[in-house]
Image (cartoon, rainbow, N blue to C red):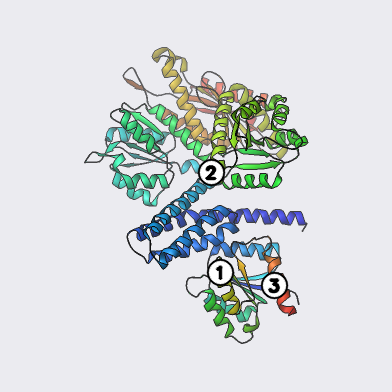
């Protein structure tokens, strides 16, 4: 199965716009951008993404809380979640993986290759 | 969609997003400064906000190509996290200096962005807000009146406090202030917060003082004051300076060609310069440089001294063989520290040296300084020394170029010929110095009122030409009427009296159905101008041919 539908959860509007350009214009995916965990939880069932790209540090509901809440929703629990973070410590990245993220991507990222990275992560995940 | 078209669209979108991102930075810098003030005042809760905002910037800056800024944000974040865990006085002062560096970087970017992004429209003239902080009401009124005639919007303040409050929410293009002002006769140099705010917002400050002293002048320099005037104020001189500052503010920063065999390094330099709003392109094929330079029309060449096939001086020598490139500044960028070697390299026609290694900020500054100097030099060659407008030959050449451009693009061009009325009488009655003043005043007014894409030149003694691309007769007439009304309003002082001047103007237009060349168009405008003179002067006449 190929990757088509991606949900992006991020509070910083600048990053949402650049991810939209990167995933829609460069990579050609179908994308739904959410400005926080609450809006993601409301829309995740109807949009039914194949992959969720989730920012770690958000003001109200942070990435880990959002991840935990997503895991509670039937059918949504299986959707691979990729966390995105500006944290550089490895220990923190390991923690996110233990919490159920399939991969952790760094910020800053290269908008020209983000789509390819997500595709590779998705393919690796589904072939397992 | 073809791959290349798509990639062009993507890079255009990326560029638009970058510009958009840049506009979000100054408020962030402000937020960070506010956080710092709270932290310095002992409010530890502000650390959390500081960490959140710098964390976000550490992630986003790099994505938008601002790697250095991203690293600076990261440094602030990490230091704030450390202080949050355990407070050491040393760390706190370190945090302060990290924040200062970061905010300075943002403010540096801000200016470049404003310069690159200001649209070439009349609106930037409309926005030309000048603030006056002057206690003497008579002077304040007189200045407001004169500045308004030049199209500036003037706001007056009677003390520094009122001006400071307005400054917190508004952004004037320039502030002109008395050194001492207000009921308590306070000195501007004691207004730390006011001075800080105006510096942070990059607003040029001009000062006026009732007394002249060396100490005051040094203080003015220390506060980056752009001009210092002593009573009695020479108003036309000050107006000229203001127009110059305004145009400097809105001028494009210039274009640089980088010649280096190390493509990666060259690309990096180009990126650094581009981030600061300077156009930069990289040339790696020495054999093609002449063709590329002619095509790209750079204001400056930045060149490596040692390259494998040809040396820098050899390439400089080749560039200098072309007449059109004689005055193009060439600067070597090299790790050569030996001054004798440097001088030897320069004897082949290069002008300057920048020594590697160099930080990004230093490179930008070094290039900006040299670009500004080269612009000044070019102005000296091409511009009329009295008025700063184009010389006769340059404006005539420009008329040809613009007409050809209009012919190719099926557009219109209006040309105005303009002559000051009874100018000989002014010279005879008040002397040449006053005559020159009238001429420079009209020149300043023209520069101020025309659009960025328009061109103005001094055609003869008191005769001017204005070229207005893509401008209808009606718009041209409206623009000239506004200039004539402004000019009429300006009071000149001589021999204890005030007098006013007027001008007559003729307008001709080139359109898709017009025959003839620039020469003919100028002649038609000239004839219309003479008609305006015979009809009683102080008016604008449209050439008959233009109405066909």
Whether marks 1 and 3 lie on the same chain = yes
Residue placed farthest to the top in the image?
B428
Residue B240 percent location from the top left of the image = 44, 29
Residue matched to label 1 = A10
Residue matched to label 3 = A121
Q: Which type of secondary structure does the marked residue at label 3 adopt?
A: helix
The quadrant of the rendering that contains the N terminus of chain A is: bottom right
- Distance of mark 2 from mark 1, alpha carbons? 31 Å
Residue matched to label 2 = B115
Residue placed farthest to the left in the image?
B184
Q: Is residue B428 left or right of residue B59?
A: left
Q: Is residue B482 left or right of residue B381?
A: left
Classify B59 as above or below B228: below
- Distance of mark 1 from mark 3, alpha carbons? 19 Å
Residue B328 percent location from the top left of the image = 64, 29
The quadrant of the rendering that contains the C terminus of chain A is: bottom right
**Res B103 seen here:** yes
């Amino acid at each position: 199965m190929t990757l088509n539908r991606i949900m992006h959860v991020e509070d910083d509007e600048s990053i949402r716009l650049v991810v939209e350009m990167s995933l829609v214009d460069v990579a050609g995916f179908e994308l739904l951008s959410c400005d926080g965990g609450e809006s993601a939880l409301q829309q995740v069932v109807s949009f039914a993404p194949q992959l969720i790209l989730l920012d770690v540090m958000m003001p109200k509901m942070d990435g880990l809380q959002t991840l935990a809440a997503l895991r509670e929703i039937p059918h949504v629990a299986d959707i691979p979640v990729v966390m995105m973070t500006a944290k550089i410590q490895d220990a923190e990245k390991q923690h996110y993986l233990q919490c159920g993220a399939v991969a952790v991507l760094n910020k800053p990222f290269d908008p020209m290759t983000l789509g390819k990275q997500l595709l590779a992560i998705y393919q690796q995940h589904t072939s397992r | 969609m073809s791959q290349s078209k798509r990639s062009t669209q993507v890079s255009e979108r990326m560029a638009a997003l970058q510009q958009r991102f840049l506009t979000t930075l100054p408020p962030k810098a402000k937020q960070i400064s506010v956080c710092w003030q709270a932290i310095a005042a002992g409010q530890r809760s502000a650390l959390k906000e500081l960490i959140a905002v710098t964390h976000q910037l550490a992630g986003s800056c790099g994505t938008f190509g601002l790697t250095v800024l991203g690293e600076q944000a990261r440094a602030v974040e990490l230091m704030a996290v450390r202080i949050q865990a355990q407070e050491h006085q040393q760390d706190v002062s370190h945090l302060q200096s990290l924040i200062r560096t970061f905010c300075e970087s943002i403010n540096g970017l801000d200016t470049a962005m404003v310069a690159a992004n200001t649209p070439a429209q009349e609106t930037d003239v409309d926005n030309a807000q000048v603030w006056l902080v002057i206690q003497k009401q008579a002077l304040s009124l007189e200045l407001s009146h004169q500045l308004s005639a030049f199209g500036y919007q003037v706001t007056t303040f009677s003390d520094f406090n009122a001006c400071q409050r307005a400054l917190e929410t508004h952004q004037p293009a320039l502030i002109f202030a008395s050194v001492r002002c207000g009921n308590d006769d306070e000195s501007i140099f004691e207004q730390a917060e006011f001075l800080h705010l105006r510096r942070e917002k990059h607003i040029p400050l001009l000062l006026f003082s009732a007394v002249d002293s060396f100490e005051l002048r040094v203080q003015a320099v220390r506060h980056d004051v752009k001009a210092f005037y002593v009573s009695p104020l020479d108003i036309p001189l000050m107006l000229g300076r203001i127009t110059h500052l305004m145009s400097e503010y809105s001028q494009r920063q210039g274009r640089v060609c980088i010649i280096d065999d190390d493509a990666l390094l060259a690309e990096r330099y180009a990126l650094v310069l581009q981030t600061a709003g300077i156009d930069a392109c990289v040339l790696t094929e020495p054999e093609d440089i002449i063709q590329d330079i002619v095509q790209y029309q750079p204001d400056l060449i930045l060149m490596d001294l040692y390259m494998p096939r040809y040396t820098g001086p050899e390439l400089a020598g080749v560039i200098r063989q072309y007449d059109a490139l004689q005055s193009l500044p060439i600067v070597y960028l090299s790790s050569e520290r030996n001054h004798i070697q440097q001088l030897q390299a320069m004897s082949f026609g290069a002008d300057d040296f920048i020594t590697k290694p160099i930080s990004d900020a230093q490179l930008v500054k070094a290039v900006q300084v040299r670009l500004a100097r080269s612009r000044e030099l070019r102005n000296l060659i091409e511009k009329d020394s009295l008025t700063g407008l184009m010389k006769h030959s340059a404006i005539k050449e420009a008329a040809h170029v613009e007409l050809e451009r209009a012919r190719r693009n099926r557009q219109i061009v209006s040309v105005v010929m303009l002559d000051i009325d009874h100018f000989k009488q002014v010279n005879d009655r008040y002397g040449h110095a006053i005559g020159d003043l009238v001429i420079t005043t009209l020149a300043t007014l023209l520069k101020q009122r025309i659009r960025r894409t328009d061109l103005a030149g001094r055609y003869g003694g008191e005769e001017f030409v204005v070229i207005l691309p893509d401008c209808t007769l009606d718009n041209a007439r409206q623009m000239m009427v506004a200039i004539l009304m402004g000019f009429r309003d300006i009071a000149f002082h001589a021999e204890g009296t005030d007098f006013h001047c007027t001008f007559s103007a003729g307008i001709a237009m080139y359109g898709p159905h017009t025959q003839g060349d620039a020469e003919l168009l100028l002649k038609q405008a000239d004839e219309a101008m003479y008609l305006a003179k015979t009809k009683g002067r102080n008016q604008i006449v449209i050439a008959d041919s233009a109405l066909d």
